[in-house]
Image: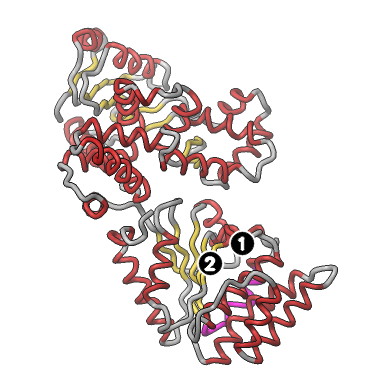
């Protein structure tokens, strides 16, 4: 990620952080919990804030918990090292602090309080049996002692904060007990695993109500276009920008990856057309050197790294990549009892790969689901060299996966929904059957009649097969025995065979709403 570009859509967030910093300087204690999916720019935002406030205002230590071994000794040593280095760097350049000896030396240069506390820490860590409570109490007490001694404020940034759960079973309780009355020290944390973050800050846990929550989202359309323009030295037509935005969903890392591929292509072709744009997207998503592909591989590997039986979890993910499913479906697929599978699903929910809504499990990010489906369940090696294959892959992605997640899909869905509700006089919503097997784009009921709508937003006409699948789905659903009215919306129109089948079963065809 080019960090200088990430701030195109983060000026508002930087302004908010700076406003909170000013309140900290005036004596308020402001704790912040920054949420956001991986690669959305949380780390870059905090580091940019830190860089802009270097050597002025509060001392701002930064520690990424994912980059250390998460045990009490390592956490404590790295926490204290980053704290002392941030303070010392106000006066002179400070090198890395790799060992306890380095830390003792650095502390002795800073003052008596630092030297005494770090010596106490060294003694605690040198014991044969580690006293975790004593070590963590000393660790979390040190920032306030330094702040008091030197009359300063401290904003301690802890990145990938969910990893702190691996340090010690009581780490949150100890941290809360020590830090809640520290007037000069604020903690700004970030996390990419939503389920664990919710667990940390939930109402039953120590930090409930103690942190202001901020969520870092994908770029909107104007900011995505601005990012594109800042990354490329040549102009793109709006249609190409729209294609990139729709496929990436405004995710800044994905946009950057596609742009880097386009730069390579432009160096050879000296021009960019829609085919080159789509080919570049496919290469980044599925090619061996594609950055989105590498990111998904890493995400999958890291998320499953703590599991001993990775194969069973992969099997579940591959199944959910095909379609959402409930616990019974997953158990049947694995041929295992539901109690055992429930344990697997709970573990997957904690990785953030999967979310659960109304008893139905699905993969959180539609693009990731599609990637799994293609990489592990059907994309032949070297298939991306064939332009026709790329067309088919991206058409499938556009229709089945991006509809639900892209701004275009949401906007069109809302527009279609609003107009149909007005036309039919019934409230409509997306419906998933309780077993997760059937999904209707829009459905609603009024006066004992069900209104069911299928939507195809691709450019090509809806086929006989599309119509037949819709009718089969209705026949297999709870609507089968009810009075019903069926509607099929297709931007690309309908084939003759599809129209005949629709007429036979009283499906009303709608092209423009």
Left or right placement of residue 236 versus residue 123 in this view: left
The one nearer the camera, 309 or 213, is 309
Q: In which quarter of the image is the N terminus?
A: bottom left
Q: Residue at x 29, y 45 (%)?
A: 259
Residue 137, x across and y down, in percent: 69, 76
Q: In which quarter of the image is the C terminus?
A: top left
Res 323 visible? yes
The one nearer the camera, 451 or 100, is 100
Q: Distance between the residues labelled 2 and 1?
A: 9 Å
Q: What element carries label 1?
A: helix
Q: Does the magenta stretch include residue 182?
A: yes
Q: Is residue 376 magenta?
A: no
Q: Quickly name the residue at label 2.
A: 158
Magenta part of the chain: 173-184
Residue 27, x across and y down, in percent: 45, 86
Residue 378, x across and y down, in percent: 46, 22
Left or right placement of residue 506 versus residue 70 in this view: left
Q: Quickly name the residue at label 1.
A: 164
Dots 2, 1 in contact, CB < 8 A: yes
Disc 1 crowd rating (10 Å Cα; few below 14, some 14-19, many 20+) is many
Q: Which residue is drawn at 42% across and 60% down?
A: 42
Residue most toward the front? 268
- N-terminal of the two: label 2 or label 1? 2
Q: Which residue is drawn at 30% across and 23% down?
A: 387
Q: What element carries label 2?
A: strand
């Amino acid at each position: 990620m080019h960090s200088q570009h990430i701030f195109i859509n983060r000026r508002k967030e930087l302004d908010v952080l700076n406003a909170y910093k000013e309140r900290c300087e005036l004596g308020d204690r402001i704790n912040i919990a920054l949420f956001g999916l991986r690669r959305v720019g949380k780390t870059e935002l905090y580091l940019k804030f830190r860089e802009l406030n270097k050597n002025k205002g509060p001392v701002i230590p930064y520690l990424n918990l994912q980059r250390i071994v998460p045990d009490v000794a390592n956490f404590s040593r790295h926490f204290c090292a980053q704290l002392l280095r941030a303070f010392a760097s106000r006066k002179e350049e400070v090198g890395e602090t790799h060992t306890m000896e380095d830390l003792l030396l650095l502390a002795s240069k800073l003052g008596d309080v630092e030297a005494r506390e770090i010596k106490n820490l060294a003694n605690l860590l040198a014991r044969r049996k580690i006293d975790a409570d004593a070590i963590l109490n000393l660790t979390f007490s040190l920032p306030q002692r330094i702040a008091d001694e030197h009359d300063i404020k401290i904003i301690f940034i802890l990145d990938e904060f969910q990893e702190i759960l691996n340090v010690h079973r009581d780490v949150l309780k100890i941290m809360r007990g020590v830090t809640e009355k520290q007037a000069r020290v604020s903690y700004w944390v970030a996390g990419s695993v939503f389920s664990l973050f919710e667990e940390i800050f939930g109402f039953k846990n120590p930090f409930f109500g103690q942190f202001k929550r901020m969520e870092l989202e994908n770029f909107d359309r104007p900011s995505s276009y601005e990012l594109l323009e800042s990354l490329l030295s040549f102009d793109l037509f709006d249609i190409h920008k729209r294609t990139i935005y729709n496929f990436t969903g405004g995710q800044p890392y994905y946009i950057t990856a596609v742009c880097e591929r386009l730069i390579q292509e432009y160096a050879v072709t000296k021009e960019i057309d829609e085919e080159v744009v789509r080919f570049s997207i496919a290469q980044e998503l599925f090619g061996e050197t594609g950055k989105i592909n590498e990111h998904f591989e890493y995400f999958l590997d890291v998320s499953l790294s703590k599991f001993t039986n990775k194969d069973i979890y992969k099997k579940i993910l591959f199944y959910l990549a095909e379609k959402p499913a409930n616990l019974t479906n997953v158990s049947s697929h694995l041929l295992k009892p539901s109690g055992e599978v429930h344990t697997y699903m709970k573990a997957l929910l904690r990785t953030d790969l999967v979310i659960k809504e109304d008893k139905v499990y699905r993969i959180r990010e539609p693009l990731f689901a599609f990637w799994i489906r293609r990489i592990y369940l059907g994309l032949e090696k070297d298939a991306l060299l064939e332009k026709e294959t790329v067309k088919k892959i991206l058409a499938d992605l556009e229709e089945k996966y991006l509809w639900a997640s892209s701004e275009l899909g949401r906007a069109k869905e809302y527009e279609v929904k609003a107009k149909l509700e007005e036309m039919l006089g019934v409230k409509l919503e997306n419906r998933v059957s309780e077993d997760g097997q059937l999904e209707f784009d829009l459905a609603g009921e009024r006066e004992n009649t069900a209104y069911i709508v299928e939507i195809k937003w691709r450019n090509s006409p809806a086929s006989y097969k599309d119509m037949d699948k819709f009718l089969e789905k209705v026949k297999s659903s709870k609507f089968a025995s009810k009075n019903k009215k069926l509607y099929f919306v297709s931007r690309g129109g309908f084939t003759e065979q599809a129209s005949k089948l629709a007429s036979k079963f009283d499906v009303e065809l709608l092209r423009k709403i």
